[in-house]
Amino acid sequence: MATARLGDGTILTYSPGFKPGDPEPKGYLDWHDWAEVQHKAGLRQTQCPSCSRWQYPQGMSTREVAYEAATSRGQKIRVSSFMCLACAEKAGPPEGAVNGR
Ligand SMILES: [Zn+2]
């Protein structure tokens, strides 16, 4: 929710009108308005395997990470999922990358 202060000191709050697929806003109240729009549009969050934070698809990179996990019966399995944009940026270019690709 965005706020604006009018000349007489009145504080006006309004929704900026988010659309599905818009990038994540900075403010706390804005984030909740934005997330509601994303969820109603059918977008779902996935967990980043690196930092464990949940992100909507627009917050995820195309960089895939493979790791070992265990099923509820203890069987070890190999899974892969995508990193969030922040972790992908921190990790630098992937191994074997040429000119950042
Ligand atoms: Zn992450």
Image (spheres, helix red, strand yellow):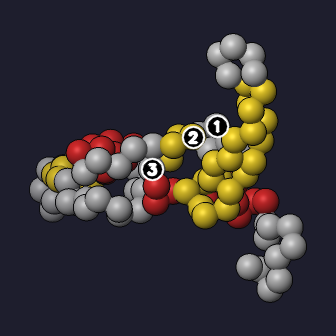
**In this orientation, which residue lies closer to the viewer: 80 or 38?**
80
**Apparent side of residue 29 relative to residue 12 in the rendered image (left or right):** right
**What's the distance in space between the residues labelled 2 and 1, CA to CA?**
6 Å
User: Disc 3 residue type?
Assistant: Tyr
Residue at x 19% of width, y 50% of height:
13
Q: Give yes or no for contact between labels 2 and 1 (Cβ–Cβ under 8 Å).
A: yes
Residue 30 seen anywhere in this rendered image of the structure:
no
Q: Earlier in the sequence, mark 2 or mark 1?
A: 2
Element under label 2?
strand
The response on whether ligand 1 sits within 8 Å of label 1 is yes
Residue at x 55% of width, y 56% of height:
60
In the orientation shown, which residue stands out farthest toward the right? 96
Residue 31 seen anywhere in this rendered image of the structure:
yes
Which of the 4 quarters of the picture holds residue 29?
top left
**Apparent side of residue 101 relative to residue 96 in the rendered image (left or right):** left
Residue at x 25% of width, y 61% of height:
19
Q: List the residue tagged with mark 1.
A: 52
Q: Earlier in the sequence, mark 3 or mark 2?
A: 2
**In this orientation, which residue lies closer to the viewer: 26 or 57?**
57
Q: Position of residue 14 (x, y in %)?
A: 17, 53
The 10 Å Cα crowd at callout 2, few under 14, some 14 to 19, many 20 or more, is some
Q: List the residue tagged with mark 3.
A: 56
Element under label 1?
loop
Q: List the residue tagged with mark 2.
A: 47
Q: Quadrant of the C terminus?
A: bottom right
